[in-house]
Amino acid sequence: MPDFLKIIQQAQQMQGRLQQLQEELARVTVVGAAGGGMVTIEADGNGRVRRVSIDPAAVNPADVELLEGLVLAAMGEAQRKAAEAAQAEMKNLTGGMNLPFPFQLPT
């Protein structure tokens, strides 16, 4: 039975480290850009958008679809970078084990 308790303790420690990782990722900043930097999106390491910046030259009332596409592309890049940052941190935390992120242990 002591082995089972040890496994539970290790799982609880891992849960604590995962919580710490998520807090650290919230402090990471990634930037996605499109249109040569005309549209930039700043997000945290969890992929939450913090800021959107649009160069006035990108705003053309006759071509709203272009601006929408630039925003979408910048958002995708920011989210991709956030996912890469999370995966890199997760790999460090787990010693290279390929676990999904975010990872939740059963409660």
Image: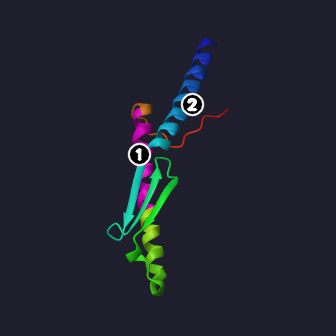
Q: Nearer the viewer, residue 66 or 95?
A: 66
The image quadrant where one finds the C terminus is: top right
Residue at screen point 57% across, 26% down:
11
Residue at screen point 45% across, 84% down:
63
Q: Amino acid at mark 2?
A: Gln
Residue 15 sits in quarter: top right
Q: Which residue does the numbered mark 2 point to in the structure image?
A: 15
Q: Nearer the viewer, residue 95 or 53?
A: 53
Residue 13 sits in quarter: top right
Question: Looking at the rendered structure, which numbered label has been put on residue 22?
Answer: none
| Magenta stretch, residue numbers | 76-92
Q: Residues within 10 Å of mark 2 (few under 14, many from 20)?
A: some
Badge 2 vs badge 1, beta-carbon distance below 8 Å: no
Tell me if residue 103 comes above or below residue 73 in the rendering: above
Q: Nearer the viewer, residue 104 or 81?
A: 81
Q: Which residue does the numbered mark 1 point to in the structure image?
A: 85
Q: Position of residue 94 (x, y in %)?
A: 44, 32
105 horizontally vs 54: left or right: right
Q: Label 1's element?
A: helix
The image quadrant where one finds the N terminus is: top right
Q: Amino acid at mark 1?
A: Ala
Colour setup of the view? rainbow
Q: Position of residue 47 (x, y in %)?
A: 49, 52
Residue at screen point 44% across, 50% down:
82
Q: Position of residue 76 (x, y in %)?
A: 45, 62
Q: Label 2's element?
A: helix
Tell me if residue 84 comes above or below residue 73 in the rendering: above
106 horizontally vs 25: left or right: right
User: Going by the picture, which residue comes out furthest to the right?
Assistant: 107
Which marked residue is nearer to the observer: mark 2 or mark 1?
A: 1
